[in-house]
Structure formats: C-alpha cells, structure tokens
Amino acid sequence: MSEQVPIIVKKKVTGHGGHHGGAWKVAYADFVTAMMSLFMVLWLMNTSKKVQESVGGYFRDPSGVGKLSGNRIPGYAKSEKDNLEELKAKLEQAIRQMPGFKDIKEQVKLTMTSEGLRIELLESAKGTFFESGNSKPTAHGNEMLVLLARELSKTSNPLLIEGHTDAKPYASDGTYSNWELSTDRANSARRLMQANGVAATRVAQVRGYADQKLFKADDPLDPSNRRVSVLVEYEKPLEQEVKPEEILKARQAAEADRSANPEQPAPSPSH
C-alpha cells in the first residue's frame, strides 16, 4: 500500500493597503480645496467692488498679457481713454459756444496725455483769465471755470489743479512771490469750480509751481507761461488692484491667525 502524500493548501492573505490605500488622500485633498475656496469667497465678499473686479480680471488674464501695471481688467484702459476723449470733444464744443470764444480761443489748450486730459488756461499780454498780479478771476476766467466745473461735475475722475507763472519776479516786498501767486490762483480756480458743482472729494491735489514748469521754456517771460491747468486724471484702478502676491500675503496672514487660535479649522495646505 503506497504512502499517501499530504495536500498542502496555501492561502494568500491580501491586505487593505493601509486604510483603503491612497483613496483617503484624494478625499482629503478635495476637502481642503473646498475649504480654501470657501475662505476665498468669504474674503472676497468683504472686499470693495474694485478689488473683486481686480481679482476677477486676474483669473480672466492670469498671464497679464495686456497689462500696463498690475493685473488689468480686459478692455479697461481703452474704455477709460475713450471716456476722456469723449469729454475732450464735449468741452471743445461747449467752449466754442461761449459768447466770447473768439477772444480766448488761442488761450485754451486741451491735450490728451499719459496722465489724463490736461486743460490749460493760458494768459495773454492782456491778462485773459486772472487780474494782473493777483488771484481774482476776470470775467473770462469766471465764465471758463464755471463751464469746466459744470462739465467735469458729470465725471468721477480725480482732478489735479496747478498754478504757474512766468519767470518775471513778483513785484512786492519779498513776502509774496510767484510761488504764492501760482498757488493762490490754483486755489481760486478750485474754490470757484467747487462752488459750481465739482465735489470737494474730486480734487486730489492743488499745486503751485511758480516758474518751474514753463509752457514756453525758450521764452521764460512769455505771458502764456502764466496759466492754470486742470488735469482730469485717469481713475487708475490698476494701481489699487489686488495682485497675486497680495492674495498670498492675505492667505499667509489667515494661516498665522489660525495657528494662534488652534480651535479654528486647520489651514489649507499648498498644492
């Protein structure tokens, strides 16, 4: 009788890969992503409209292809330039309709610049906009500044008002100079414009330059160097936008705050 060979059965036990393998990592990543999204939404809800538009502009154009500085809202610069070009055309038309236009047409210059629309009221040998040697507007000056105020009150752009003189020293005892005269004329223009519709908050700056920025540098004594300029500036939300690095700083600040308060939810890890 032959000897019976025992049958050996091998059982392979398979594990579960440590709590179902890596599936939990995917679920956790989804969770922290959702938490980060919630944090961003809550943060944006408490920011200004300009910040919200800026962040939206960044995600629409993350490479910043068309930017001048910061992150640009697509089409913004073109729209802003068009608005000031339209304002320039309206002002030119309104000025042409003034009763005394023929007397001042050579003394009013409207120019588009990189800063915005510059409106310059140039003096002539006869005076034109301000009484000789002081800051009181003439009849032409009063009429022109009131016209500008009524048109500019319809816009929201910041205004910068400048006063300038020629290089001839101011005839006084030395206590009053071209510096004071240029500043006083700019302030006189500001007061008159504010009295005729321009909100006080619209005036960003009032400056007096004396003879430091001549209109005709080759002729320092030319009457046109005596002038008041009103610069209608671009609204420039680009400089106030939230840039990616500022968003990162806000996130880091929030994480630091949570670290100081352990009872709050844990911060989202970077991906």
Image (cartoon, rainbow, N blue to C red):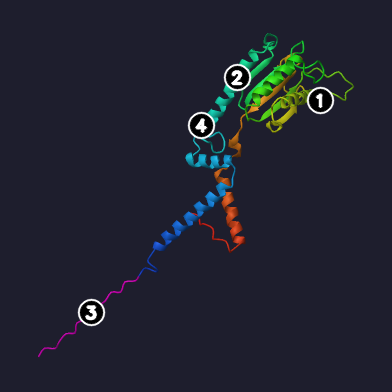
Q: Residues within 10 Å of mark 4 (few under 14, many from 20)?
A: few
Q: Are marks 2 and 1 in contact (CB under 8 Å)?
A: no
Q: Position of residue 231 (x, y in %)?
A: 66, 25
**Which residue does the image show at 57% across and 40% down from the upper left?**
49
Of marks 2 and 4, the one in the foreground: 2
Asked if residue 11 lies in the magenta stretch, the reply is yes
* Residue assigned mark 3: 9
Question: To which residue does mark 2 refer?
Answer: 90
Q: How many marks?
A: 4
Closer to the chain start, of discs 2 and 3, is 3
Q: At x 73% / y 26%, what residue is drawn?
A: 195
Mark 4 vs mark 3, CA separation in Å: 76 Å
Percent across and percent down for residue 1 are 9, 91
Tags 4 and 3 touching, CB below 8 Å: no
Main SS class of the magenta portion in the image: loop
Q: Residue 90: percent from the left, percent from the top?
A: 60, 19
Residue neighbourhood size for the residue with mark 2, other residues' Cα within 10 Å, grouped as few (<14), some (14–19), many (≥20):
few
Depth check, front residue: 46 or 74: 46
Q: Is residue 267 above or below residue 78?
A: below
Give the Cα distance between marks 2 and 1: 33 Å
- Disc 4 vs disc 3: which is toward the camera? 4
Q: Which mark is residue 223?
A: none
What element does badge 2 sit on? helix
Question: Residue 40, image x and y in percent?
Answer: 53, 50
Q: Secondary structure at mark 3?
A: loop
Of the two numbered discs 2 and 3 in the rendering, the one whose residue sits closer to the viewer: 2
